[in-house]
Image: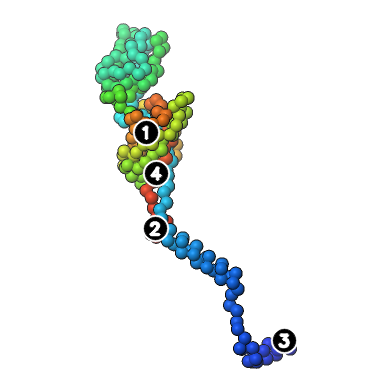
């Protein structure tokens, strides 16, 4: 009770009303000034600055038209292989000969292109539908390979044609590893199934890898014809692409 009476008497006494009141120390004013400057700089950067980001996705080097698997129409023993890897073939040209109960049957190319891989060997026994060769769909042997990236469907909307892409060759041979700078040529409109990717690449194993997290969207990346530094590896070589997305102002992330 005594403490309350002392407090009331001090409030009612005007003897200290003429003393100056110190609102802040000099150190506090300095901190306040620095805080205001930092906030002003951050606001200016938010409205005038830009931030770039990248989207990374797996892919593969391939001809622009892809490649297809040539399969044996009959069962039997391979008696002769008529081409070698890298050979350019025309539609209808025989690639191998299979001996059946009804005689020798040729396995012919269904379309022109370049033999990327041979699976049939002389003396091997094949069944109907067995893979004989992988044929690239190329019309110009000097045409450079492209990189096809398989981007998750939910992230492909931010990619625009013409965007720069850093393509890193994975598992490249000695002297050929490195990063190439390409440009986005086209972005797929719809996600692709495993069967569609396998039909385009002629490789069901890669198709299974690219669809492991769901059906992706294909992004076609054009590579330079004569790049400086390390050149691209062979068709079918896995790559990783880092797509440069459009620059944004930081304030765009806050505003709807």
- The structure residue drawn at horizontal position 33% and vertical position 35%, both measured from the top left corner, is 222
Q: Which mark is residue 48?
A: 2
Residue 142 placement (x, y as % from top left): 30, 24
Disc 2/disc 4 C-alpha distance (Å) = 20 Å
Compared across the picture, whether 38 is left or right of 186 comes to: right
Q: In the rendered structure, which disc, 3 or 1, sits on the residue that comes first in sequence?
A: 3
Q: Residue furthest right?
A: 2
Query: In the image, which is nearer the foreground, mark 3 or mark 4?
Result: 4
Disc 3/disc 1 C-alpha distance (Å) = 84 Å
Residue 246 placement (x, y as % from top left): 37, 48
Classify 10 Å Cα crowding around label 1: few (below 14), some (14-19), many (20 and above).
many
* Residue at which label 1 appears: 147
Disc 3/disc 4 C-alpha distance (Å) = 71 Å
Query: In the image, which is nearer the foreground, mark 1 or mark 2?
Result: 2
Q: Is residue 198 visible?
A: no
Q: In the rendered structure, which disc, 4 or 1, sits on the residue that comes first in sequence?
A: 1
* Residue at which label 4 appears: 244
Residue 50 placement (x, y as % from top left): 40, 53
Q: Which mark is residue 43?
A: none
Q: In the rendered structure, which disc, 2 or 4, sits on the residue that comes first in sequence?
A: 2
Query: In the image, which is nearer the foreground, mark 4 or mark 1?
Result: 4
């Amino acid at each position: 009770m005594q403490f309350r009476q002392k407090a009331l008497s001090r409030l009612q006494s005007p003897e200290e009303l003429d003393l100056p009141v110190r609102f802040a120390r000099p150190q506090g004013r300095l901190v306040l000034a620095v805080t205001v400057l930092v906030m002003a700089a951050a606001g200016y950067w938010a409205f005038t600055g830009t931030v770039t980001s990248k989207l990374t996705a797996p892919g593969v080097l391939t001809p622009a038209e892809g490649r297809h698997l040539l399969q044996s129409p009959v069962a039997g023993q391979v008696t002769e292989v008529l081409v070698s890897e890298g050979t350019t073939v025309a539609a209808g040209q025989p690639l191998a000969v299979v001996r059946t109960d009804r005689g020798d049957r040729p396995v012919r190319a269904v379309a022109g292109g370049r033999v990327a891989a041979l699976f049939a060997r002389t003396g091997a026994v094949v069944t109907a539908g067995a893979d004989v060769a992988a044929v690239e769909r190329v019309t110009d042997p000097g045409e450079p390979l492209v990189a096809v990236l398989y981007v998750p469907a939910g992230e492909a909307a931010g990619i625009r044609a013409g965007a720069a892409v850093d393509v890193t060759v994975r598992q490249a041979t000695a002297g050929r590893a490195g990063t190439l700078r390409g440009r986005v040529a086209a972005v797929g409109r719809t996600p692709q199934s495993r069967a569609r990717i396998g039909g385009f690449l002629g490789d069901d194993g890669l198709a299974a890898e690219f669809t492991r997290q769901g059906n992706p969207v294909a992004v076609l990346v054009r590579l330079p014809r004569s790049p400086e530094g390390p050149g691209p590896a062979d068709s079918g070589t896995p790559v990783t692409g880092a797509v440069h997305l459009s620059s944004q102002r930081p304030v765009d992330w806050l505003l709807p």
